[in-house]
């Protein structure tokens, strides 16, 4: 940078301080890097591009150009060839060899006084998109820039879509693989015990095992259908007016018998002022029933299960707290994966492996989330946050 004059530094700083104007809500403002050492060209060119709402970056030598390309990832480079230190040929060669594909494919317009057919061919061979001889028309350069940038942004959007589809495809394949693995395991259990029973062994344990496996398969099928419907977008989570305290009480009543069998008490804490809010009732009920069911299954007999509901800013936060064995920190994220069972409970009780995964999918489909909070006392606290939309009708 030592060779830059004070004027040049001032100009660079001034450009850098200019806020990036916006071209629209989805796409960042397109940026153009001008690599040029002639102030009489830089200023009118930069000004005309800024008037078109581009974010303009300037490098007055090849080295600064390479640095700015890496730091700012411009959407287009207007590249002079005769430059101090690295010339434009070198800059273009290095750009095309960049390890990040998105940078390596940045469109380049070579702008130069070298106008022989050999120079043009050399520029195009090095990967320039266009080769414009000096003197040039600023209007023509504006139009060509717009075209190249539009094409690039279109390509980037297509690439993002493709990546998303590939990711979804991979998730789907993994999910299907896990599902069949789980189905095979359960059918193996049922088949084994059925054979024992039919060969004359009569033990209630066998019947119970078959019953547990078939109940599990049933829950699995229901969970899977709901989650699939939500993920496929074919199941719209429409909001309806409800009073959260009423839904919580209703769910506690559903589990009253099961709780009584294990001598479990529910402690409902709700700062609800009776205001109706908008949420999807079936999804909320599936979330609550999974969390309450888990708290009863995995928590000890005689425990108190706390269901705490409060409003925080624009969120409704529901916590289900049991007094069971604490799920280790390293498993805190993994328990929301399909078919993952916390090691502590894996051998203890057969539960639906989709339960917590389903809670996550449904919470997210409603614009919220679920996580396992870290609490000091023994036990686990599942926290569901959902957007709070008061029903004003
Ligand atoms: Ca030059």
Image (spheres, rainbow, N blue to C red):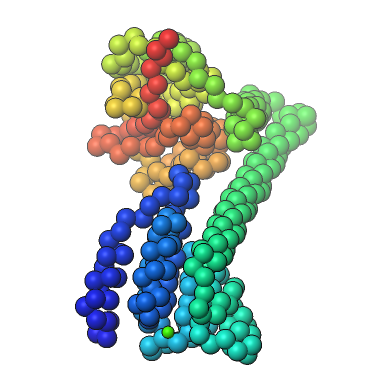
The residue under the point 29% across, 26% down is 312
Say if 91 sits above or below 203 in the image.
below
Q: Residue furthest left?
A: 6
Between 126 and 244, the one lying in front of the other is 126
Q: Quadrant of ligand 1?
A: bottom left
x, y (%) of residue 184? Answer: 70, 41
Q: Quadrant of the N terminus?
A: bottom left
Say if 130 sits above or below 156 in the image.
below
Say if 294 sits above or below 239 in the image.
below
The residue under the point 59% across, 74% down is 130
x, y (%) of residue 236? Answer: 59, 26
Between 354 and 40, the one lying in front of the other is 40
Say if 94 sits above or below 326 in the image.
below
Between 44 and 78, the one lying in front of the other is 44
Q: Is residue 174 visible?
A: no
Residue 118, quarter of the rendered image: bottom right
On the rendered structure, is 205 left or right of 18? right
Residue 82, quarter of the rendered image: bottom left
On the rendered structure, is 261 left or right of 166? left
Q: Quadrant of the C terminus?
A: top left
x, y (%) of residue 181? Answer: 66, 45
The residue under the point 53% across, 87% down is 114
x, y (%) of residue 316? Answer: 35, 24
């Amino acid at each position: 940078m030592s060779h830059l004059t004070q004027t040049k530094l001032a100009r660079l700083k001034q450009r850098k301080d200019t806020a990036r104007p916006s071209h629209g809500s989805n796409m960042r403002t397109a940026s153009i890097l001008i690599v040029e050492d002639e102030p009489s060209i830089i200023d009118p060119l930069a000004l005309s591009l800024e008037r078109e709402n581009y974010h303009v970056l300037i490098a007055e030598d090849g080295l600064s150009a390479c640095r700015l390309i890496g730091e700012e990832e411009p959407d287009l480079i207007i590249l002079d060839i005769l430059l101090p230190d690295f010339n434009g040929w070198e800059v273009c060669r290095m750009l095309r060899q960049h390890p990040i594909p998105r940078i390596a494919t940045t469109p380049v317009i070579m702008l130069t006084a070298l106008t022989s057919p050999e120079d043009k061919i050399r520029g195009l061979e090095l990967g320039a998109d266009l080769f414009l001889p000096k003197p040039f028309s600023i209007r023509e350069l504006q139009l060509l820039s717009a075209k190249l940038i539009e094409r690039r942004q279109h390509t980037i959007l297509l690439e993002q879509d493709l990546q998303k589809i590939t990711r979804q495809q991979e998730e789907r394949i993994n999910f299907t693989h896990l599902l069949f693995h789980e189905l095979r395991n359960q059918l193996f259990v049922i088949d084994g015990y059925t054979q024992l029973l039919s060969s004359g062994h009569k033990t209630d344990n066998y019947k119970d095992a078959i019953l547990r496996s078939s109940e599990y398969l049933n829950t699995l099928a229901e969970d899977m259908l709901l989650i699939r419907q939500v993920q496929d977008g074919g199941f719209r989570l429409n909001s309806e007016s409800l009073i959260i305290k009423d839904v919580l009480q209703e769910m506690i009543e559903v589990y009253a018998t099961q709780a009584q069998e294990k001598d479990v008490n529910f402690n409902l804490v709700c700062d609800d002022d009776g205001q109706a809010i908008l949420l999807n009732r079936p999804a909320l009920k599936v979330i609550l029933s999974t969390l309450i069911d888990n708290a009863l299954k995995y928590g000890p007999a005689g425990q108190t299960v706390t269901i705490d509901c409060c409003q925080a800013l624009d969120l409704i936060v529901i916590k289900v707290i049991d007094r069971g064995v604490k799920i280790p920190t390293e498993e805190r994220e993994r328990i929301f994966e399909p078919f993952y069972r916390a090691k502590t409970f894996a051998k203890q009780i057969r539960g639906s492996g989709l339960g917590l995964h389903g809670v996550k999918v449904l919470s997210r489909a409603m614009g919220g989330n679920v996580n396992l909070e870290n609490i000091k006392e023994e036990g686990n606290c599942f926290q569901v946050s959902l957007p709070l939309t008061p029903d004003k009708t």
